[in-house]
Image (spheres, helix red, strand yellow):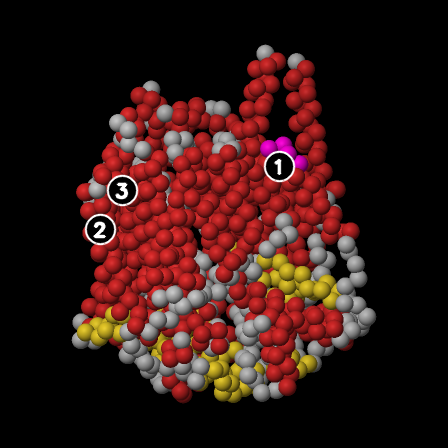
Amino acid sequence: MNMRISKVLVIIAVGIFLLGIPYFVTSPYVMHIIIFSGIYIIFALSYDIVVGYLGMLSLGHPAFYGVGGYTSVLLVMKLDVPYVIALPIAGILALIVALIVGFPALRLSYHSFAIVTLAFTLIMRAVWINWVSLTNGPMGIPGVPRPTIDIPFLGAIHIETLTDYYYFILILVIITCLFIYFMIHSRVGRALLSIRENEVLAETLGVNAFKYRMIAFAIGAFFAGLAGSFTAHYITFMGPEFTDFYYITMLLIMVILGGSGTIHGVIIGAIAFTFIPEYLRITPEFRDVIYGIVLLITIIFMPEGIGGKINEIIYKRRVKTG
Amino acid sequence: MRKQLTVMTILFLFVSFSSFVFAADPIRIGYIGPLTGSVGLLGNEAMKGATLAAEQINAAGGLLGRQIKVYAADDKCNPAESVSATRKIITRDRVVATIGHVCSSATLAGMPINKQQKIPHVVETSTNPMITARAGKGGNKWLFRPNLPDDINAMVFAKMIVEIGGPKSSYLMVNDDWGRGVATSFKKVMEEHGGKVLSVDYYDEGETNFMSVLTKIKGLKPTSLFVSARTGSGVVIMKQFAELGMKMPVFNQGDMVNEQFVKLVGKDVAEGLIGSESWYPGIDRPMNKKFEQDYIARWGYDPIEPSAYGYVGVQLIAEAIRISKKATPAAIRDGLEKMDMDTISGHVKFDEHNQAWTWVVIAKITDGKVKVVKEVQVDRPAGYWEKWEKKLKK
Amino acid sequence: METFFQLLVNGIAFGAIYAMVAVGLTIVFGILEVVNFAQGEFYMLAAYVTFLVYLVQIPYPLAIAIAVGTMVVIGLVVERFAIRPLIGRAWQLPILSTLGISIIMQNGAIVIWTPNPRTIIIDIANLNIDIFGVVIVFQKLMIVFFALALFIGLHYFIQKTKTGKAMRAVSQNKEACRIIGIDVPRISSITFALGAGLSGFGGALVAPVMAIHPVMGIFLVLKCFAAVIMGGFGNIKGTICSAFILAIVESFAVAYVSLQYKDVFAFLVMIIILLFRPAGIFGKKVGI
C-alpha cells in the first residue's frame, strides 16, 4: 500500500515538473534542446523496439524518420491536408514502407538484415535527392508551415512558440512511452522477448517469429515517422539531410549506452546525448571521436547500458529486502 | 557509473555557468557554418577569415572602444543542426549578429530563427537565389547577402563558356542544392547564347569513380566540360579526366581554381582550368593584396574563396556598427541597410531584397598559378526580383 | 565500341579494388562471424600511411609494404581489445564495436589530417597505356595484377598451409577446434590481421590514383558489403566474383542510365539477388 502511494506521488511530482518546465526555463536555446530531447526520446525508443526488443540491428531507421517528415510536409504543403491528419498518415506510411522492406529483409540472417536496411537508407536518400519534382531534391523544402490543430467547436490551436512545441512533443512522448510500455507487457511483447532469447524454442512453442518481427519493425517505423514529421514542422524545413548516417550513430549511442530493452534507460540516453554534444566545448571532430570511444567502452564493459544497470541495482535490492 | 554521471553533471553545470560568469565587454559576432563533414574545410576557412578580420579590427583599436570576438557554431551543412547552431550561438554566446552558412539548405533553415530572435545575419557563401528572394522587402528583414546568386553568376560565366569553350558542353555537377542550382541557371544562359548542353550528370559528394561518366562524356565529344566541384571531388575528377586522355577545356564553379588544387593534382593536369567566383587571389587592388599577405602571415598558407568571404562578413558587421554607432542587433541591421563599402570581394550596397550587386571574377590557371582574367561588375537585370517573387508565391 | 571496352576496363579496375576490401570482410565474417564496419577505415588509413611515408622520400614499393605492415599491426590491436572480449556474447556487440572503431578512426583522421584531400603524384603510375583507343593507366593495371596475385596466394594459404587449414576448421566449428587443441584466439588474431592487411593493400595501391581523404573508406565499404552478401557471407570466391560483377554493372549503368543513381544500382542488384537467393548467388558456404 505504502509502495503504491509513493509511486503515485512520484508520478504526480514528475508530472508537475514536466508541465512546469516552460515556466522556469527561460532560455530559448535550452528550451530548444529540451524539445529536441523529446524528438530523440521518440526516435530512440522506436529504434529500441527493433534493436532492444526484437534484437535485430536495423540501420534503416533514419529512412523512416525521413519518410514521416516528407509525407506530412508534402501532404500539408501540396494537398492542404490539416496537420492533425497528416501526422498520423506520416506514421502510417512509414509503417507501410517498413512492412514492404521487412517482408524480404526480416527473412534474412541477422547480418544481412543489418546491411540490407543500410542499403535501404541509402536508396531512400538517393530517391529524395533525385526526385526533384516531388521533394525539391537536395534544395530541400523551406517554409514548412507550423502545425495548426483544429479542434471541433473549440477553434484552431496554432503551434508557434517554443512552449507550444514543448507541450506538443510532451504529449507525443507520453503517448509513445505508454504505447511501448503496454506493448512490451502484452502478448506481443512476451512473444518478442521469447524470440529474442531463443528463436527455435519460441517457434516450437507456436510463436510465429516472422509475424512478430514484422509487427515490431513496423511499430518502430511508425513512431520514427511521427518523430520525423514533428521535426520537419518544428524546424520548418525538410531535406534529405534528415537521413544522414550521423543519426544512426547518435541513435545507437543513445540506445546502447542508455540500455537497450529498457524504456527509462533509453530516455536517459536520449536526453543525455541531446544535451552533452550541445554543451561539450570541444572541436566537433574530437566530439565524434569521443562518441566512438564512449560507444566502444560501453559495449565492452557495460553492454547492458545505464538502464540495465539500474534494473540490476533494483533487482539486487529487492532480493536483499526479500 | 554513478561516478561517471556525477562527472558529467558537474561538467554540464560548469559549462552552462561559465558562459554567464565570464560575460564581459567584447562585441560578440557568431560564425555559423559547417565545421565538420564533407564541406567542413570551407566552414573552417571562412572562420579563419572571420577571425583575421576581427583581429585586425581589434589591433586597430576595436569598435566603439570595445574589442570584437567571433564565436563559432557547427551547422554540419544540415538544416536541423543549423537551427540548433543558430539558437545556440544567439542564446548561449549572446552574439549581436551572425554570419555564415555554406550550404543553402542550412541557410534556409537558419533564417527564420534569426528573424524570430531579431539578430541580423550576413550570408557570405551560399549562392541559392531563393535566399535573398525570401529576404528584405516583404520577407526576412534580418538577412543580408554580399555575394551574387548563382543565376547572376551564370549570366557572366555561362556566356563565357560558350565564347571560349565552344558551343557543345557537358556538365558534371555535385548532387546538392548548390550543384543543382548552378546546373539549372547555367544551362538556361548557355542555351540563350547559342550553346548546347549535351549531358548533365550529378554525382554524390565523396564519389571516387568518375571513370564511367567521363568515358560517356568523352564519347559524346563535347567542346568543353563544365564541372561544379569542391576540392575533394575536383581532384578525383581531374585525375581521371587526365587518365582517360581527355583534352577539352574545363570550366569550374567551386574550389578548383586555386594553388592548393594545383599542388594536389599536379601542374600539368590543372593547367588551363577556368573558374568564376566573387573573389580570387591575385585581384590587382591594394586591399586584396594586403588581405592575401595578412592571411598567409596569420595562418601560414594561401587563402581560398571562403576565407575571403568570412573576412568580408565580419568587416560588414563592423562597418554597420560604425555606421549606426551602436552595437545592438537592431542598430546593426539598420547599419547594414545603409551599407556602402568597398570590400575585397567587390562593392557592397544592399538593395530592397538585401542583396548586394558586386562583381564576377574570372580566373584561369596559367603556368601553375591563378591568374585573374577579368572582373565584371554586375547590374541587376530588369524584373529580376519580380520573377523570383512570382516563383515564391507559387 | 571504344566506349564499351573502356567501360569494361573501368569496371574491372574498380572491381579489383572492391574485391580486395571485400575479401578481407568476408574472411573475417567467415571465421569470426563479425561484420567489420572498420574495414573501409583500414583502406583509408593505409592510403594515409603510404602518403606520409612517400612524403619522406621512401620509394613507393617500400611505402606499400610499410602501409600494409602498419595495418596488420593495427588489425592485431583492434582484434585483441575490441573484438576478442566480445566473441561469444550477443551477436550485435562485435558489429557495434567495429562501428565504434570506424567512427574513431574516421574522425581521428579528420582531427589529424583535416578533411582536405591529399594526393601522391608518381609519374610512372599515371602513365597512360592506349590500346586502340581504350586507355588504362599503369597503376590500375598494377592494381588488377596484384589483386589477382593476392587472391591466388590467399587460396594456397588457406588450402595448403597448416594455419590456413586451422582457419577453415575454426570457421566450421569453434568448440571442436578448442577440444582438439587448435589455438582459436591465435587464429582469430591472424584472420583479423589478414583482413586488415588486404584492405590496407588496396588502400596503398590506390593512393597514387585517388584523392586520399578521411571518408574514402566508408563509401567503398558499403559496396563491399553488397559484394559480400551477394557472394554468400564467408564465401571467398563468391565475394570476388560479386565484386567484379558489381563494379562492371555499376560502370555500365552509370554510362547508359544515370550517375546520380549509381549507389542504388549496386544495392538494387544486391536486394534482387537476396529476394531470390537469400544466401547469395553462390550459396552460403559456412566455411571459407
Residue depicted at x 30% and y 63% = C254
Q: Is residue C57 visible?
A: yes
What's drawn in magenta, residue-wise? B1-6
Q: Is residue A64 visible?
A: no
The percent coordinates of residue B333 (x first, y second) are: 72, 69
Q: Secondary structure at mark 2?
A: helix
Crowdedness near tag 1: few (<14), some (14–19) or many (≥20) residues, C-alpha within 10 Å = few
Estimate the spatial distance between the alpha carbons at disc 2 and disc 1, rounded to whole Å.
49 Å
Magenta: main secondary structure: helix
Residue in front for this viewpoint, C273 or A222: C273
Q: Earlier in the sequence, mark 2 or mark 3?
A: 2
Residue type at mark 3 is Gly
Residue B274 shown left or right of residue B136 in the figure: left
**For residue A174, what is the image quadrant?**
top right
Residue at image x 49%, y 77%? B258
Classify 10 Å Cα crowding around label 2: few (below 14), some (14-19), many (20 and above). Answer: few
Query: Which residue is located at x 51 percent, y 55 percent?
Result: A238
Q: Mark 3 highlights which residue?
A: C234
User: What amino acid is at disc 1?
Assistant: Gln
- What amino acid is at disc 2? Gly
Q: Position of residue B217 (x, y in %)?
A: 30, 73
What residue did someone put label 1 on? Answer: B4
- Disc 3 secondary structure class: loop
Residue, disc 2: C153
Return the chain for callout 2. C
Left or right, C270 with reference to B173: left
* Residue C111 marker: none
Residue C92, located in which quarter of the rendered image?
top left
Name the spot of residue C247 as percent of width and height, x first. Answer: 27, 58
Q: CA distance from mark 2 to mark 3?
A: 18 Å
Q: Is label 2 on the same chain as label 3?
A: yes
